[in-house]
Image: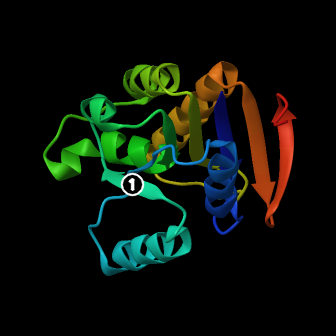
């Protein structure tokens, strides 16, 4: 089953996704946490440390992959949590700032679809960054459009879509029985 978990910053979506995959994974089966955040700042390192602490003892093997997701697929188990789609797309979309080619939703989606197709259970976490009412520079607005398109493509492919708000999950698509 492929599950897309979406929510705003601080919504509880990461903890929900981790617990969801833990419940859905048979005892003893390896779970892979596919981490996508670039460690380019102290704030990013602190956030990563918090996430590592929160998932300690849950049996995840962490695979760091900030871009070029297809290269990480052979290393993944059949039970995968990808944290998070919006970071992955950001790393790809703003690739020129890291000395790489820039890639958008159309290039990233096939890699995510491949991950979803190879896993027994894949939980993909993404951000809802569309409700703040702000206007951004042209490049950031294009990133937001790309993320919206990628989220739509993933929601269509997913068996279930769950939005987390204030720690509370709302299932918009599918059944999580």
- Colour scheme of the rendered structure: rainbow
Residue displayed at 77% across by 42% down: 162
Q: In this view, does 111 lie above or below 83?
A: above
Q: In which quarter of the image is residue 176?
A: top right
The x, y position of residue 135, in whole percent, is 60, 54
Residue displayed at 24% across by 32% down: 71
Compared across the picture, whether 40 is left or right of 152 comes to left
Viewer-proximal residue, 30 or 102? 30
Q: How crowded is mark 1: few (under 14 residues within 10 Å), some or many (20 or more)?
A: some
Q: In which quarter of the image is residue 100?
A: top left
Viewer-proximal residue, 131 or 73? 73
The x, y position of residue 52, in whole percent, is 45, 71
The x, y position of residue 27, in whole percent, is 60, 47
The x, y position of residue 106, in whole percent, is 43, 21
Q: How many labels does the image show?
A: 1
Residue displayed at 52% across by 25% down: 116
Where is mark 1, residue-wise?
A: 61
Viewer-proximal residue, 29 or 42? 29
Compared across the picture, whether 131 is left or right of 172 comes to left
Picture quarter with the C terminus: top right
């Amino acid at each position: 089953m492929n599950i897309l978990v979406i929510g705003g910053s601080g919504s509880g979506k990461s903890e929900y996704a981790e617990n969801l995959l833990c419940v859905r994974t048979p005892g003893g089966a390896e779970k892979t946490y596919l981490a996508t955040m670039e460690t380019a700042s102290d704030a990013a390192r602190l956030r990563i440390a918090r996430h590592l602490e929160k998932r300690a003892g849950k049996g995840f093997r962490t695979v760091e992959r900030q871009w070029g997701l297809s290269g990480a697929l052979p290393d993944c188990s059949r039970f995968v949590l990808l944290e998070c789609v919006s970071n992955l797309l950001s790393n790809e979309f703003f690739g020129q700032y890291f000395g790489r080619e820039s890639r958008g939703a159309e290039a990233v989606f096939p890699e995510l679809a491949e991950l979803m197709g190879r896993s027994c259970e894949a939980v993909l976490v993404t951000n809802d960054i569309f409700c703040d009412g702000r206007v951004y520079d042209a490049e950031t607005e294009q990133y937001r459009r790309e993320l919206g398109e990628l989220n739509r493509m993933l929601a269509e492919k997913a068996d279930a879509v769950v939005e987390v708000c204030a720690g509370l999950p709302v299932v918009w698509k599918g059944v999580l029985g």
